[in-house]
Amino acid sequence: MAKTALIVIDMINTYEHEDAEALVTSVRDALPAMCPLIDRARRQGVDVVYVNDNFGRWRSQHDEILEVALHGRHADLVEPLRPDDASMFVVKARHSIFYETPLEYLLTQQGVKRTVLCGQVTEQCVLYSALDAHIRHFDVTVAADAVAHIHPELADAALRMMERNMGAAVVPADRVEFSRH
């Protein structure tokens, strides 16, 4: 199995946007799968990379983004997932984790050939990120119960598209296998 990195998408969040309430409900449902997935990756020495929106705050860096989210009204959704000292952090401005970010370079430097995606939003950032990973010849796995959505029917369609069109393995988080080599 190829060297793997776990990518945590947009989970450092203030939930202050139009679709926040629908998303918050789904995040609460995904946390019981997401937290153990991140913990298991850390225990196994797998690279954990947080890729997160900057919320239009162009002078912010990861500590500030985390601090703002931890003081938001849904800090309880952020605290269990906070990056540890070994985690890497990439700031993004658009939907894809790859679009105009250094992520591809980082993964290549780390020798990563396979990405495992978790986070939010399934039918937006996770879908576009899976496509961009596939285009860049990374193997893609999506932890289906560790991704959160706004629209359930679109999320289901997005997961099917990732599996069918991008060859992604779409599996429950507890069935995700990691490799450090």
Image: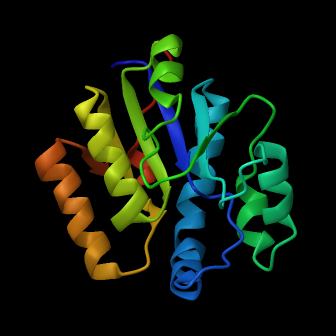
Question: Residue 56: x and y, percent?
Answer: 66, 59
Instruction: Name the residue: 34% across, 67% down.
Output: 123
Nearer-the-camera pick, 74 or 57: 57
Q: Position of residue 113 (x, y in %)?
A: 36, 21
Q: Is residue 109 left or right of residue 55?
A: left
Position of 115 relative to 16 (above/below): above
* Residue lying at 12% horizontally and 49% vertically, measured from the top left: 165
Disc tally is 0
Residue at 48% from the left image edge and 22% from the top image edge: 107
Camera sees residue 87: yes
| Quarter holding residue 152 | bottom left
Residue 58 image position (x, y, % from top left): 71, 50
Question: In the picture shown, does residue 74 fall above or below 59?
Answer: below
In the rendered view, would you say 153 is above or below 95? below
> Residue 141, located in which quarter of the rendered image?
top left
Q: 14 or 114, which is in the foreground?
A: 14
Is residue 179 among what the camera can see?
A: no
Q: Quadrant of the N terminus?
A: top left
Q: Is residue 121 left or right of residue 40?
A: left
Residue extending farthest to the left is 164
- Residue toward you, 80 or 8: 8
Which residue does the image show at 55% across and 51% down from the upper left?
93
Q: Is residue 80 rendered to the left or right of residue 167?
A: right
Coordinates of residue 158 in the picture (x, y in percent): 25, 64
Here the colouring is: rainbow
Task: Return the residue nearer the eye: 48 or 44.
Answer: 48
